[in-house]
Image (cartoon, coloured by chain):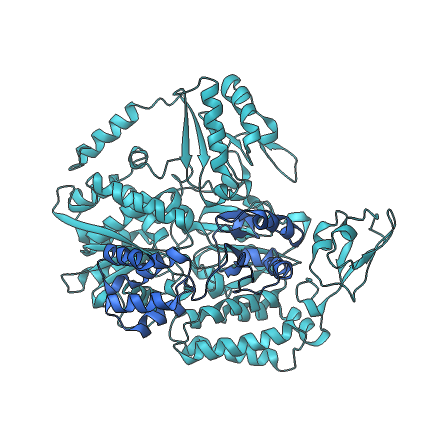
Chain colours: A blue, B cyan
Amino acid sequence: MVFEKIDRILEEHEYKHSAVISIMQDVQGIENYLPEDTLRYISEKLELNLTRIFDIATFYKTFSLTPRGRHTIRVCSGTACHLGGAVKNLEQIQRTINIQEGETTDDRMFSLETVNCLGACALAPVMVIDEDYYDAVNPGKIEKILSPYRLEPEV
Amino acid sequence: MKQIKTISDLEDLRKSILKQRDPEKITIRMCLSTGCRAKKSIKVISALEDELNNQGFQGKVEIKRTGCHGFCEMGPIMVIEPANIFYRQVTSGDIADIVSETILKGNIVKRLLWKDAGTKEYTKTERELPLYKKQKKHLSYNSGKIDPTDIEDYIAADGYSALCKALSAMTPAEIVETVAASGLRGRGGGGFPTGLKWRICSTAPSDIKYIIANGDEGDPGAFMDRSLMEGDPHRIIEGMIIAAFAIGAGQGFLYVREEYPIAIEHLSLAIQKAKEYGLLGNNILGKGFDFNIAINKGAGAFVCGEETALIISIEGKSGTPRSRPPYPAFEGLWEKPTIINNVETLGNIPQIILKGADWYSNIGTSTSKGTKIFSLVGKVRNTGLVEVEMGMTLREIIFDIGGGIRKNRQFKAVQTGGPSGGCIPISKIDMPVDYDSLREAGAIMGSGGMIVMDETSCMVDIARYFLNFLLFESCGKCVPCREGLKQMHHILTNICEGNGEKGDIKALTELGHFMISTSLCGLGATAPNPVLSTLRYFHDEYVAHIYDKKCLAGVCKNLFEYMIDETLCNGCTLCKIRCPEKAISGEKKKPHRIDTAKCIKCGICYNSCKKQAVIVI
């Protein structure tokens, strides 16, 4: 099933080696991370050395080699957000869900990431959960922001 | 759809679009850019549509979904034309009043007007807002006015006229010389003269050439490129086509950050529409010129803003810079002559072609021409994007346009140029903002981020912040950058954690100068700037951290304590209720106390206190 989807993506990009980054971005869209089997499959189909695929997968921040949670929390750590207290917000999230940056909770509910800048600096400090933006965040708001996601029924 | 083949085709189309429009018709402009969207502007629009339909206004009132107005903090923003009424922070709950009062009767809904926090006065129209008054909106003129997904809206606003002029009345060499004479310099960071870059590339011998638009806006704190790509994508496409014609390129690439999905969506649509209208593709405007544009999504690597790294990334590899020369203008993408311009640079091209080099070079200072968009953010009252003439002073930008510092605190510094830039102190507040003055002051123009800091900002922490950022973004190829950053970061971390030692300042300075002179690319060569500029202007703060073990800005955790000023505390209990560690004690209406042994310095009490009784010692 997954490999069929990968084939379709490869065809869309005409198996071009120069498009390998775009291919990997699209493939990551399937499972929200890049499993080892997937990387090997891409390497085989493109006839491109696995080391190059792995190099790209580890060089660019967008790629993840480990599974992510149902909800991805991204805390913006751009300059305006940093000045506005992004670190204190991040620490409060870490205390609340008990994981560090780059980790996923044991129940696979949340993954926690930081992002260089979301370009929403006038709303600093900003955090994004999946597609939802939260502006002017402070540590006191964290629990209130996170709790509705915990209650969401599983799809 | 009839394809545009000649200038008169374009003129005819423009006339027919304008003829169908009624300037007196009520038009509601709603911003759908990232900022306003984050504040639920989509929900507001659908409520507005429902209400207008219910009240029988179908077809009588036009709703225009626009790009960024620049005043993102006040989103969602709504402007009602032709009266130019400016409403801010509009929610779905306000729609009934807007329709029944403003649309139906022409009355103002006062609570939605912008109010000056200082003078308490209301501003009725968009053009009277202090944030906009001193601006010169040339480049960002369309953003917030036109629908970026509608090519005809761009054409109606004189769009693609410059392309017609360039292709039908100018030779490639004339275009290059016009851009050179305009004095336009690169808006991405370096400030290299754009015309010169084009001239070099246009004379490089090769049948195949490329043009790349750099929309990989990586500087944290800068978002003008995002706003431009989202709000006026055709302007960038038009600039690219003209540039391609001038240097003889047949293929263009738009490299856009993955973090900007709306920009990617709008640019993709703009490319598709431009093709349909005959403005991209084969035989553009019947002049025998072929040109296509592809979009590349960046994958989250700051170093890919550097031109050689960006080229390697487009080639499908991990983006590590290479040494120059050869410069990309001679040997770039797939070893062919390539020009790389920032999207803001390219956005300037249509107006230069249309209005001429003289018009453009009359704006700005002797060495920095034109206008520049800055993202004015941080501890300033009015935050957002501002486009001003080069040479305006920092004071005018921060105090006149930005309205000064929030919460009546003191201005401490402004950081420009992102991780390659520097911090400018109060003593330089009257300096003009242009490429050369900023460089002299130890900062750079960069892409135009302007982050204002007050007394709650720690300058040592800011220096460490940028080094930490670059430490993760350094590609690791050259030793000075990889190891230099690591060592400098190590020293700064020690200082911030209270383990600073004698000799640290000297070591930071030496390492900094060493990195500047020996790094492979611009990332490493400018990385020490935030450290060196804060050392230059805020030396005392470093001394306080190293020797007195104090961070009076209340940022470096080991170097301060929170305390309640008992003369200011009115015992409202808010801090006590909110403290997650139960570290605050006190009875209602009596001064409270913080148990410093329990305090984790999360800052919740500091932010909650309405009397500002929580202080840093």
x, y percentage for residue B163?
23, 43
Quadrant assignment, res B330: bottom left
Q: Nearer the viewer, residue B455 or B68?
A: B68
Left or right of B105, for residue B172: left
Q: Position of residue A68 (x, y in %)?
A: 48, 60
Q: Nearer the viewer, residue B401 or B98?
A: B98
Q: Residue furthest front?
A: A1
- Left or right, residue B182 beside residue A95: left
Q: Is B583 located above or below residue B273 in the figure?
A: below
The quadrant in which residue B481 appears is bottom left
- At 58% across and 71% down in the image, what residue appears? B535
Place of residue B256 in the rendered image (x, y in percent of width and height, measured from the top left): 36, 55
As drawn, B550 above or below B65: below
Say whether residue B468 is left or right of residue A23: right
Query: Which residue is rendered at x = 56% and y = 56% of the image?
Result: A81
* Most distant residue in the bottom direction: B503
Write the residue at 43% across / 57% down: B447
Number of labels in the image equals: 0
